[in-house]
Amino acid sequence: MLADRPIEFHRGPCLLTTDRRRIPREAALALLADTHWAQQIRAATFGRAMDHSVCFGMLLDGSLVGFARAVTDLATYAYWTDVVIASRHRGEGLGHWLVECMLAHPELQGFRRIALLTRDAQPLYAEFGFTTSLGPSTYMERAPGP
């Protein structure tokens, strides 16, 4: 289990918590089932991912409406993944607030790099200083075959 300290942010009726005990895993998995990148993730795999990531759960009146994870060593690097807002709440500024909170998290400061991949949210992340070019660096990956 990642040894991060849970924190909370409040905005009107919304609570954003990093306390994994307060984030309903089944509801987070249901949010991800509505995405193009995590439709097939198994509950056991997702549970391990949550246990070893800084998780952000956005609760509105007790229901999970947003979720994100930062895969990190808590010292130099974070990779943001599984950033999602429930479809019925998109366009309300919740994604913007989620990114603000992720960037404000006290244990995710001073890193050399925060990375993410996105297919359709470049304008949102660009507002916060994310760029598509890393200069002379080359993004590479190894993905298992079918």
Image: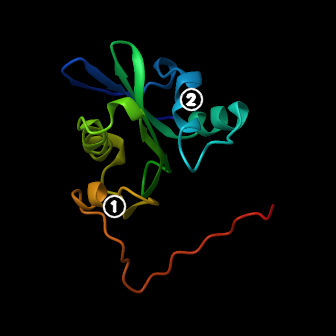
How many numbered discs? 2
Foreground residue, 113 or 5? 113
Q: Which residue is mark 2?
A: 30
- Amino acid found under the numbered disc labelled 1: Gln
Q: Residue at x 42, y 53 (%)?
A: 75
Q: Residue at x 57, y 50 (%)?
A: 37
Q: Is residue 51 left or right of residue 80?
A: right
Foreground residue, 68 or 1? 68
Q: State how far apart marks 1 and 2 are (Cα).
A: 24 Å
Q: Is residue 138 visible?
A: yes
Q: Is residue 5 visible?
A: no
Which secondary structure, mark 2? Answer: helix
Quarter holding the C terminus? bottom right
Foreground residue, 62 or 30? 30
Q: Which class describes the residues within 10 Å of circle 2: few (<14), some (14-19), or many (20+)?
A: some
Q: Is residue 134 above or below residue 84?
A: below
Kindly check if marks 1 and 2 are in contact, taking CB atoms under 8 A apart as contact. no
Q: Is residue 145 left or right of residue 2?
A: right
Which x, y percent locates residue 67?
A: 44, 34
Q: Which residue is mark 1?
A: 122
Q: Residue at x 57, y 35 (%)?
A: 50
- Amino acid found under the numbered disc labelled 2: Ala
In which image quadrant can residue 68 be found?
top left
Q: Residue at x 60, y 45 (%)?
A: 38
Of the two numbered discs 1 and 2 on the same chain, state the one appearing first in sequence: 2
In which image quadrant can residue 77 be found?
bottom left
